Amino acid sequence: MVINHLIVGSGDVDASTNFYCELLGFRKTSDDPGAAGGQVLEHDRSELLIIPFPAEKMPNPAHFAFEVDDLDRFNDLLAHAEKMGLSPRSMPPRNSPLGPSEFLRGQNKYRIFYVFDPSGVNLEIMVKIELNHGQGRSALNKIGPMTIHEAASKGYQTAGDSYDKGRPEYPAEAIRFLTEELGIAPGKSLLDLGAGTGKFTQLIVSSGAEILAIEPVEGMRKKFSELLPQIKIIEGSAEKIPRPDHSVDAVVVAQAFHWFDGEKALPELYRVLKTAGKLGLIWNARDESVDWVSKLTDIIDPHEKGAPRYKYGVWKKAFKKTSLFSSLSEKNFKYVQKGSPDMIVDRVASISFISALPPKTKAKVLNEVRELLANHAMTKNRREIELPYRTDVFVCTRQ
């Protein structure tokens, strides 16, 4: 992000702070704002000072040159802004030959937005949508015939041990539900796509189904083979599944679909599934209504840097656009992961974008987690900590 005007006046500093943090990814600092009741925020190498001053008296509105790779994600943020009672809108720049709200600067193509913050400050936000005359910049790291998001390919390559130690299992009732819905049983073929270290796979081995696991990251495949040597795992991705047409009865994706390019993955899933075959998705999501878990998220989220996340719901868009599958049905369960403070640290270390951080930064993040656990009233002096989750299960059928 490049901030051209560093000072924003606000009649409600707290509301403005929440706006810039929630919608634009800023984070609070402990720096002296130089004004009573003010707040200093930062984003990468940028700094924003919010001061208690009527916005209408500011000589210039805040002006942002804000670049993101995922336009859909930014549109989701704009929708969130509307729900917050703000007034985001797009406006065409003058004399634009590219159509409403798009323009070229050098080799890059941008879309421009104007958004009002809680105090009425008008923000101009430029979203970079294409590079090199439409060739596009991608957050995907190409590996051979497959595409893997950079955060996943880098982070998960070294996170196998932490993933196995720190990631929760899934509630038994959710496994039973998914097994019944997908028809996982002896004589049936099941594809476990994005299998990771086998955290989900190990819970369905006893079903008697013929299971094939697919995982694009070598480090995760290696850990999977150590833990589940009896299950075959091969290299592959959701966008290029190395299986014949109409070859599997069901596909399950545990904790992974948000990483996929959904519009490419769904046709591939349609291709490999038999007629009326089932697709099941499952995620564990931390219950952030619990105070210490919410503070844990505050430590984690500033480092996501645009990595796909289940909680943003962008992954659902491919399902809304396709006619290849029925509508998603959803069922929710509760789950509590119990373990030592070290297990919680491993849980954080297993997150792709945390694992991919520079060593010193990663160590700092994990130390912040240890400090939270040592000092929060709900976790301090406890040898066993309960980390609550909501488990979300989705099922659809090949049409």
Image (spheres, rainbow, N blue to C red):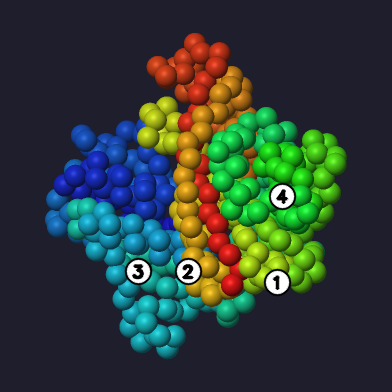
Mark sitting earlier along the chain (4/1): 4
- Is 120 situated left or right of 211 in this image? left
Mark sitting earlier along the chain (2/3): 3
Q: Are marks 2 and 3 in contact (CB under 8 Å)?
A: no
Q: Quadrant of residue 96?
A: bottom left
- The disc labelled 1 sits on which kind of residue? Arg
Q: Secondary structure at mark 1?
A: helix
Where residue 186 appears, as percent x and y from the top left, is 76, 50
- Circle number at residue 185: 4
Mark sitting earlier along the chain (1/3): 3
Q: Quadrant of residue 323?
A: bottom right
- Is 149 situated left or right of 298 in this image? right
- The disc labelled 4 sits on which kind of residue? Ala
Q: Which residue is depicted at the point 63% across and 54% down?
A: 182
Q: Secondary structure at mark 3?
A: strand
- Is 248 situated left or right of 55 in this image? right
Mark sitting earlier along the chain (4/3): 3
- Is 36 situated left or right of 374 in this image? left
Rendered-image quadrant of the C terminus: bottom right
Where residue 170 appears, as percent x and y from the top left, is 59, 37
Residue behind mark 1: 271
- The disc labelled 2 sits on which kind of residue? Lys
Q: Nearest to the eye among marks 2 and 3: give it.
A: 2
Gap in angstroms between the C-alphas marked 1 and 3: 39 Å
- The disc labelled 3 sits on which kind of residue? Phe
Gap in angstroms between the C-alphas marked 2 and 4: 30 Å
Residue behind mark 3: 113
Q: Which residue is depicted at the point 53% across and 49% down?
A: 393
